[in-house]
Image (spheres, rainbow, N blue to C red):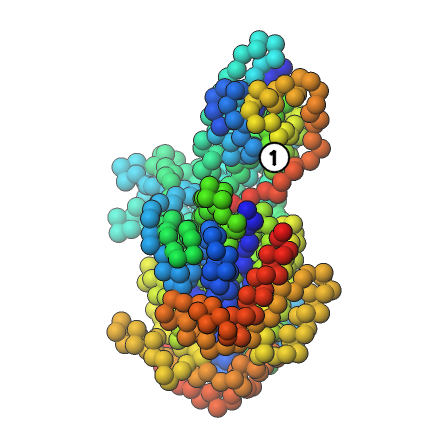
Amino acid sequence: MKIAFSSYGKTLDVLLDERFGRAANFVIYDTETKETAVIANTQNLEAAQGAGIQSAMHIVNAGAEAVITGHCGPKAFHVLQTAGIKVYLTRAVTGEQALREFEAGRLTPSTQADVEGHWA
Amino acid sequence: MKIAIASGKGGTGKTTVSLALAETLGNRARLFDCDVEEPNCHLFINAQPTHIEPVNVLTPEFDLKHCLGCGKCAQHCHFNAIAAVKQQMIHFAELCHGCGNCVLNCPANAIARGTRQIGRLEFCNAANFELISGVAQIGSSMSPPVIRQLKRHADRQRINLFDAPPGTACAMTAAVDGCDYVILVTEPTPFGLHDLQLAIQTLKMMNLRFGVIVNRADPQVDIIGGFCRQQQIKLLMQIAFSRRIAEGYSRGQRLLQAAPELKAEFETMLKGLGAI
Amino acid sequence: MKEIVLLSGKGGTGKTNLCGCFAQLSGGAVLADCDVDASNLPLLLRPEIRSRHDFYAGFEPQFDPLKCLRCGDCSAACPFQALGVDASGLPRLRATGCEGCAVCVSVCKTDAVTMISRQCGEWYESQTSCGVMFHAKLLPGGENSGKLIAQLRRAAKQKALAVHAANLICDGPPGIGCPAISAVSGADLAILVTEPTVSGLHDLKRVAQLVKQFGVPAQVVINKCDLNPEMADAIQSFCQSKQIALAGRVKFDPLFQQTVQTGDTVLKYPQSEPAQAITQIWQTICATLN
């Protein structure tokens, strides 16, 4: 399955970006092939509004089944939940650490957004 | 005739002046409270609304039976208010501007033009004039549609007075748009002068005629008068600071109740504007 | 690092003066003037601009004179009546009204309309005697003021974290609409500045409800409190009924206007009544945040 990590960089050993909606990139990791792909999210850094929604749509379109991030706002969460994508929140510093937590079963899927949306 | 009362800076006395103008004109006036986020005119009138009109905006209603799941509606939404998730359409009402572009671009005609309420208009018969207040719902964030619907009740046979919101952004411009004259109310302070200049810039950009009233005037401080003379801007009136007026205001007393002697000055000013 | 935003509902209650004082008392805060279409904090704190940034948000239409048929469909279809025509009959944006929705693009039969990014204003990072300040100028009639405010707060927050500032203090806009929501959502504390008048209480109730809806804790400051002691007490009762803390009261004082003239705050006279009242209020706020 494919897992999306919100990231400052382009590989899993880089810092995890705690913010889902305004993350610089998404690193998509395939658990079967062990390969990673990168989706740049820069236009959502600058989006007038609905950045979380657009970021979530990137994940839907990439075919990911799970998202691992630091914080997820209500609109992004709504979209991901509707698409059946699980959201895992972590305090891990790098994507790699977060992946190890996930594989060890230490992360549980969220039932709701954990932060308020940012207006505009 | 349409006269707007605006300012730039908040708290300078727009509502105070608007009510005084309405009271001076009596049944020749219709007063519109366009500060729909924080409408205050009704607080100074001892009357209940006679009726309420909802303010609705367009909202898309998705017919999922005919939806192709193409996502064109989401692609064409410039406000990111639609997410097309595997044929489950999510609409984010708080981001929606009610423009209908999604409806226009649906290849299957699967979106209907629904409505949702974002505020209301309250109609009130005041002391001797009509008041219509616009009230935006708390958290709704969209003022211009409420203001536009409010202004559609302008009466050609009357002097329509629009009490505008503070600032110079889209809510204020929606209130002053299309007016024959704008009265800018300010106070003789550095903030008052600065924000007056911003408001004037906005009105000039919109090609609107305007003049200035100085509220809480102090004979020792001619900061606004000096500016108006230098820029050849019409200084319509000065209302002297008075503790009595300020205290009356704090209790909900109108200006002409606290200082009835000012009515003659308002009449003179309105004559000069061609309203009387 | 804690973010404090000053709101009021009603304009003219004294947010900016109070904000200036908090900036001085905080000693090492980062500041943001989020009242972007009537920005007054710079008048008080006299910033030196260090960097200037164009602010683009949303879109506006551009009309191709070679493809345009002058049919008028776009201006008829515009949901915001934002289109007029120029002397040659080519559609032209009116000074205000366009929300960047692109309905005009959708109805045009000859693809003569394209949407381009719209410049709504500019924002600045500046140095003041109280710390770094972020402020902005919205173009007259500007749309997307909410986004400009969000941009300022984002830049200010990044800076505050980078310099290990104790506080980010934001001077907020009046009202309860998009700009106010953008200024306060996600803040650690909202300071609601009110005055003891019928209008002040009415508007305080609406802004208090807004702030609660967005999950931001609030405290109230009653400014010009001696103008009407009964109303001041009514406001206090309201606060108690909603379990909103009262951070303090400040009396009307000509010293506020006097000091603004020279770009100072009342703290220039630390023994004065207003200075002492505000210092006490700041201490109450700090105690809440820690």
Q: Is residue A34 above or below residue B91?
A: above
**Residue A76, image quadrant:** top right
Where does residue C139 sit, x and y in percent of width and height? 37, 54
The residue furthest right is C241
Q: Residue at x 49, y 85 (%)?
A: B242
Q: Quadrant of the N terminus of chain B?
A: bottom left
Q: Quadrant of the C terminus of chain B?
A: bottom left
Q: Residue at x 57, y 83 (%)?
A: B248
Q: Which element is circle 1 on?
A: loop
**Amino acid type of the residue tagged 1 in the rendering:** Cys
**Residue B48, image quadrant:** bottom right
**Which of the pair B112/C37 is nearer the observer?**
C37
Label 1 crowd (10 A; few <14 / some 14-19 / many >=20): many
**Is there any visible trace of residue C101 in the rendered image?**
no
Q: Residue at x 55, y 60 (%)?
A: C7
**Which of the pair C9/B124 is nearer the observer?**
C9
Q: Is residue C164 above or below residue C9?
A: above
Where does residue B271 sit, x and y in percent of width and height? 39, 83
What residue is disc 1 on?
A72
The residue furthest bottom is B261
Q: Residue at x 41, y 81 (%)?
A: B217
The residue furthest front is C271
Q: Is residue C260 above or below residue C171?
A: below
Where does residue A110 sit, x and y in percent of width and height? 69, 31
**Is there any visible trace of residue C35 in the rendered image?**
yes
